[in-house]
Image (spheres, helix red, strand yellow):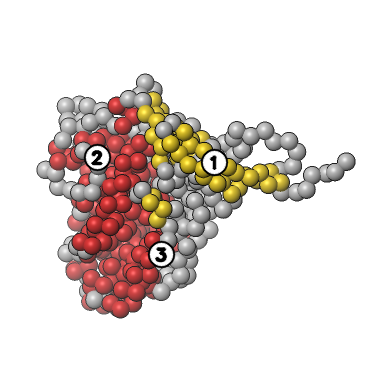
Amino acid sequence: MQLPPADRMQSPCTGYTRAHWESAADALLAATEPYAAEGGALYHFPGEHTSWSGRVSDGLEGYARTLLLAAFRQDETALQRYAEGLAAGVSGVWPRIEDRSQPLVEAASIAVALRLTRPLLWDRLDDGVRQRAAGWLGDALTAEAWPCNWELFPVTVGGFLQEIGHEPEASRKAIDRGLERIEEWYVGGGWYTDGEGRKFDYYNGWAMHLYPVLHAWFADDSRLSAVYGERLEAHLADYARLFGGDGAPLHQGRSLTYRFATTAPLWLGALTGRTPLTPGQTRRLASGALKYFLDRGAVNSDGLLTLGWHGPDPAVLQGYSGPASPYWASKAFLGLLLPPDHEVWTAVEEPSPVERGDEVRPIAAPNWLIQSTGSDGLVRLHNHGSEDVRYDPYYTRLAYSTVTAPSSSYDNSVIVGGDPSRTDIEPLGVGDGWAASRLSLLPISEPTRL
């Protein structure tokens, strides 16, 4: 990927400016264009990997997630291609949005993109295409979502359909239902759990905060903006400390193949004015993460994002990961909605939290302790509050960092016989320099009695 020369005057930490972000967006978009199929309705990237949703759904994912990138870039030429793809998609190419189906996820990306580009895309469509598109999206209003961040996809689609006057009552009900649902998972201090239990990871930023805040911003709803903006601001005070001095995000949680999507909440705070970070800190963190991945092989020789962390890596994939899944990283380009003269682009970069010195920071809501050292730029997480419904090394281990990947074995444990399962973590609290929890080790099979 060809990027402009580093600008160490404006960006002494990363060398990246708005021009680098624009070039990266343009290169990523251009690389995907040859893989459009079915009149531009599907994007089939090379390789044999398929998600559990199947090839057609994976192709829809490719369309929706790269459309989101074109929308943040406000690329009128690319948007014309996506308008043609939309017309083809809603004429029978795309699978219907059904209960707990992947098209529900992708409908949310399409809805966000259509709201961002309405004069450039939606308003230029033939009336028949608009009616078919609204009808296709409308299934999202009543489709059952998985009980997690998926509850926000009908909210996002409902916001767009309400704006264009399609099924306003059903749209309102979908919005109210989803926003009420996430209140059950808000645990305070700017943190949500991603569904029942104690699942804390990047879905806090790139979903649980992103969609409600964008919904309020689109609707110009001052009440919701106050509620969700306050939560986002609180979250970012902790979130900014999850990035290493080299730009690496903490290697914890699922969907890590989304890579620099981790920067989306940083830009969202700047976009809405709800951030504790200075403009120079925001850009340093975001540019640091983008540079970290671009420097380490996230983009292959064809210019495509690969399934992995640095380069290809099946260890970070889930069953829902398809060839286009990495393009959830398009959310990182949300910052391009801010004009070139916005202070987040004009300010001189400032050091990130880890670069300002050593710190041990307790985070009460997830029961975490963040330890960072300025000399090596490392961030370590002492986990005393996050787990999945089953043992998962990306959720349940006791420690994570910005320079290590978790192994599958149980950490800080001596296993004697059997095959135990660590489960039911019980947070005991955090404080100045400490965090504590209790957990159970449950044998899968009864031990042999002698």
Kindly identify the amino acid type of the residue bearing the numbered disc 2: Leu
Q: Is residue 150 above or below residue 393?
A: below
Q: For residue 64, say whether it is visible.
A: yes
Residue under the point 48% across and 66% down: 100
Please tell me whether mark 3 sits on a helix, a strand or a loop: helix
Image quadrant where residue 304 sits: top left
**Disc 3 marks which amino acid?**
Arg
**How much space separates mark 2 and mark 3, taking CA atoms?**
29 Å
Quadrant into which the C terminus falls:
top right
Q: Nearer the viewer, mark 1 or mark 2?
A: 1
Instruction: Read off the residue under disc 1.
Output: 437
**Sequence-wise, which precedes: disc 1 or disc 3?**
3
Q: Which residue is mark 3?
A: 181
Q: Residue at x 31, y 59 (%)?
A: 212
Residue drawn at (75%, 49%) of the image: 445
- Observer-nearest of 440 and 404: 440
Task: State the residue lying farthest toward the top.
Answer: 375
Looking at the image, is mark 1 or mark 2 earlier in the sequence? 2
Asked if residue 70 lies left or right of residue 60, the reply is left
Looking at the image, which residue is at 27% across and 41% down?
24
Q: Could you tell whether 81 is left or right of 413 in the image?
A: left
Tell me residue 354's x, y (percent).
Answer: 34, 29
Q: Which mark is residue 277?
A: 2
Question: Label 2 crowding class (10 Å Cα cut-off): few <14, some 14-19, many 20+?
Answer: some
Relative vertical location of residue 37 with respect to residue 132 in this rendering, above or below: above
Q: Could you tell me residue 243's position as x and y percent? A: 36, 35
Disc marking residue 255: none
Residue 413 on image: x %, y %: 64, 34
**Distance from Cα at disc 1 to Cα at disc 3:** 28 Å
Q: Position of residue 114 (x, y in %)?
A: 25, 63
